[in-house]
Image (tube, rainbow, N blue to C red):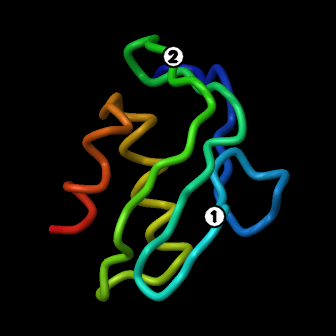
């Protein structure tokens, strides 16, 4: 089993790696608070990810999905389309 190189947290705290910077109706902005390294060793810089919150997911579930996708190596630009499905 590979050893973890870093911890990626998500939640509603500004100390979490991935948090919500704003939400209005179904529009939301997720804030990646610090650089992360995915399972392939690629770095993702701090940024905001704009998306429509899926009606079938709560806020923390949306954060969990987005964080998991980032760690698995999905580009941040692809996340809104994947979560919306």
Labelled disc at residue 60: none
Task: Indicate the secondary structure of the residue bearing disc 2.
Answer: strand
Side of 83 relative to 43 (left or right): left
Residue 6, image x, y percentages:
68, 27
Side of 12 relative to 82 (left or right): right
Between 10 and 21, the one lying in front of the other is 21
Residue 38, image x, y percentages:
46, 24
Residue at the farthest top position? 41
Tell me the residue at 43%/47% (across/down): 68
Q: Which quadrant, please, contains the C terminus? A: bottom left
Between 38 and 46, the one lying in front of the other is 46
Task: Indicate the secondary structure of the residue bearing disc 1.
Answer: strand
Q: Residue 22, located in which quarter of the rendered image?
A: bottom right
Whether label 1 touches label 2, CB < 8 Å: no
Which badge, 1 or 2, comes first in the chain's sequence? 1
Q: Residues within 10 Å of mark 1 (few under 14, many from 20)?
A: many
- Say if 55 sits above or below 6 in the image: below
- Say if 21 sits above or below 77 in the image: below
The residue wearing badge 2 is 43
Q: Nearer the viewer, mark 1 or mark 2?
A: 1
Q: Residues within 10 Å of mark 2 (few under 14, many from 20)?
A: some
Q: Residue 54, located in which quarter of the rendered image?
A: bottom left
Tell me the residue at 68%/65% (across/down): 11
Residue 59, image x, y percentages:
53, 77
Tell me the residue at 63%/31% (across/down): 46
The residue wearing badge 1 is 20
């Amino acid at each position: 089993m590979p050893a973890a190189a870093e911890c990626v947290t998500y939640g509603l705290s500004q100390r979490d790696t991935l948090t919500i910077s704003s939400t209005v109706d179904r529009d939301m902005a997720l804030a990646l608070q610090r650089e992360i390294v995915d399972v392939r060793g690629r770095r993702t810089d701090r940024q905001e990810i704009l998306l429509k919150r899926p009606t079938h997911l709560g806020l923390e579930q949306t954060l969990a999905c987005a964080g998991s996708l980032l760690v698995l190596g999905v580009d941040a630009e692809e996340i809104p389309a994947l979560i919306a499905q």
